Image: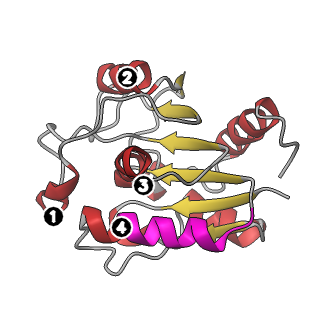
Amino acid sequence: MTTFIMLPGIGGSGEDHWQTLWERSHPLMKRFNPPDWDKPELSTWCRALQDAIDAADPPIILVAHSLSCLLVAHWAMESRSKVAGAFLVSVPDPEAPAFPSAANSFRKAPSTALPFRSIIIASTNDPYGSIGYMEKRAREWNSELVNAGEHGHINASSNLGEWGEGQSLLRNFICGLGLGEF
């Protein structure tokens, strides 16, 4: 059975966020727990991610939203741990005006290819990162890119509920990895 590690962005993805709703529906989806959701520090978030991976049974899929997409890229440059893949939703642009100052330690995003398969899901009207920025990250990280249309930041404010389209994309991604269904 595949283990899914849910990696919310700043604030921890509230009650109406698709990540929280997915966790309630799928017992194999486990949230990582950094020390502070509102004051992200790259080194402590990387440690929390590593702890979650160390505690999980493989194969492991990382399901990241927003700031945690950058976390995955930073962590991947330092860790030797094996993950099967990463599902990255709404990669924020650290140079965009909307990027939170509380996340300054995440600003220098790696431009090296990720050492595992990945997919970036992008919205054409995301206030935290343009489609052009996400296309650039997809090229650099050697990630597949899916343009999901106009969904804002693909968060609770996007009113997506359980985000059926996202679940289909995740199913297709894990099937492409040869891991079956979730």
According to the picture, the residue beneath numbered tag 3 turns out to be: 157
According to the picture, the residue beneath numbered tag 1 turns out to be: 102
- The disc, 1 or 4, on the residue closer to the chain's N-terminal end is 4
Distance from the alpha carbon under mark 2 to that under mark 4: 22 Å
Depth check: 22 or 137 in front?
Answer: 137
According to the picture, the residue beneath numbered tag 4 turns out to be: 45
Distance from the alpha carbon under mark 1 to that under mark 3: 21 Å
- The disc, 1 or 3, on the residue closer to the chain's N-terminal end is 1
Distance from the alpha carbon under mark 1 to that under mark 2: 25 Å
**Image position, residue 95 (x, y; %):** 14, 37
User: Of helix, strand and loop, which one carries label 3?
Assistant: helix
Distance from the alpha carbon under mark 4 to that under mark 3: 24 Å
Give above or below for 65 relative to 27.
above
**Image position, residue 111 (x, y; %):** 30, 29
Is there CB contact under 8 Å for labels 1 and 3?
A: no
Give above or below for 111 relative to 73.
above
Is there CB contact under 8 Å for labels 3 and 2?
A: no
Report the amino acid beneath label 3.
Answer: Ser
Q: Residue at coordinates 37% horizontally, 63% vertically from top-left?
A: 46
Report the amino acid beneath label 1.
Answer: Ala
Where is residue 26, by image quadrant? bottom right
According to the picture, the residue beneath numbered tag 2 turns out to be: 140
**Magenta segment, which residues?**
46-57
